[in-house]
Amino acid sequence: MFALIRLLFKPPEIPRAPDEIIDWRGSTLYFVFNAIAVAGPFLLLSFLPFWHAILVSAVFALLLYTLACKKKTWETTAGILLVTHAAILLSLPSPSDFLVLLSMDICFVLFFVRLFFVHTGHHIYFSHTGFRTGRLSQCVLAFVTEMALQKGVLQWASNHRDHHTWSDTPKDPHTPKKGFWWSHVGWIMSPKYADYRSTRVLRDFGQFPEIVWLDRWYVVPPSILGILVFLLGFAWGGWVGGISTLIVGFFFSTFLVWHWTYAINSFAHVFGTVNYKITPEDTSKNTPALRATAGEQNHNNHHRHEKSVRFALFDGEEDWAYPIIKWLERIGIIWDLHEPTPEQIQKGFLEPRTT
């Protein structure tokens, strides 16, 4: 914690360019969304009886801790999920408590589902073309990926490709060397990167009008998702139910997905271990504490093997998205997956290690 506080106040190693400014006024909706996401669950808890609210808060805190704790196995995580659900069902049997449970479940399902598609769609496919797929599947992938409300796939991929090309140099959009806060969230509010589309990404995907349309109207997929989440709660508990599922299920899960994704840009370039030395400037690291991010915590591995669909390369590393991606290959939805050979994995590694 103290290390993080020091980072927040540490002077930037690389000064930001004159056009790397933050549009505070233009970011008003972003701040409002974050405020609703954070304050909403506490407001909803205030309508429950005191001890009910305490129990639900404890359950939610335990689930968040489970997501962040790198020492928990997925079997243990599943056990905690079952126990916490049983605690609510047995201790809080009223309809309002079932509504809280429904909202919480939607939140965590959407958290993992959207992290998977940010990892697979925004990152592996549109940024690095790590596999091939059909045109219809590509369109569906773009649509579902944009439900994470991280702008369009072309804009996301353009900034990310520049991050790899200029990693931790002055041209890197979000290096922590420009300031930890900037790398985590500041650059997102900069007009310089808000509407950027690189010629390399447009060359790969700009010939597909449906992808260009989705990139321009990126608010459509998350808006549809938000409406569906509201309607699910409304069917259970009227307007109160709809607002509850919307705030906790959609707003709060979006907030979690945002900041877990941002953490790869910030934390995974500051805290962790290094398997490969990429360039003299590159500070990418493997950060196991970010294990919920579908393999993205193996960020140094990824910087070494950019096109690989497999991020966990050595014993002891985790990548829960990889088996799902391989399953999609087996049923024929995707093909031509890029994976490094054992020889490529060992090449450039700082010391011999088991793959």
Image (cartoon, helix red, strand yellow):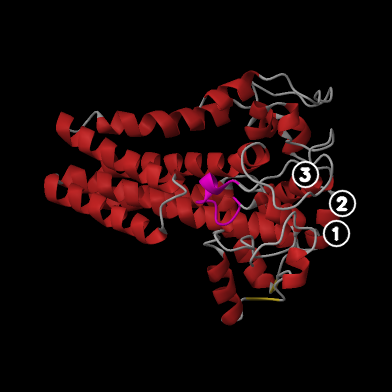
Q: Is residue 168 left or right of residue 133?
A: right
First of labels 2, 3 by sequence position: 3
Answer few, some or many: residues within 10 Å of disc 1's Cα (few below 14, many 20 plus, some between 14 and 19): few
For the residues carrying marks 1 and 3, which lies nearer the camera in this image?
A: 3
Q: Amino acid at mark 3?
A: His
Q: Is residue 37 left or right of residue 142?
A: left
Query: Which residue shows up at 60% across the image and 65% down it?
Result: 140
Residue under numbered circle 3: 163
Q: Is residue 71 left or right of residue 51?
A: right
User: Which span of residues is magenta-colored?
Assistant: 287-297
Q: Inspect the magenta stretch and tell me whether residue 173 lies in it.
A: no
Q: Assess whether mark 2 and mark 1 are in contact (beta carbons under 8 angstroms).
A: yes
Q: Amino acid at mark 2?
A: Thr
- Residue lying furthest front in this view? 352
Locate the C terminus and report the quarter of the image it occupies. Answer: bottom right
Assign a secondary structure to mark 3: helix
Image disc number at residue 203: 1
Picture quadrant of residue 23: top right
For the residues carrying marks 2 and 3, which lies nearer the camera in this image?
A: 3
Percent of width and height locating residue 171: 84, 36
Residue 49 visible: no
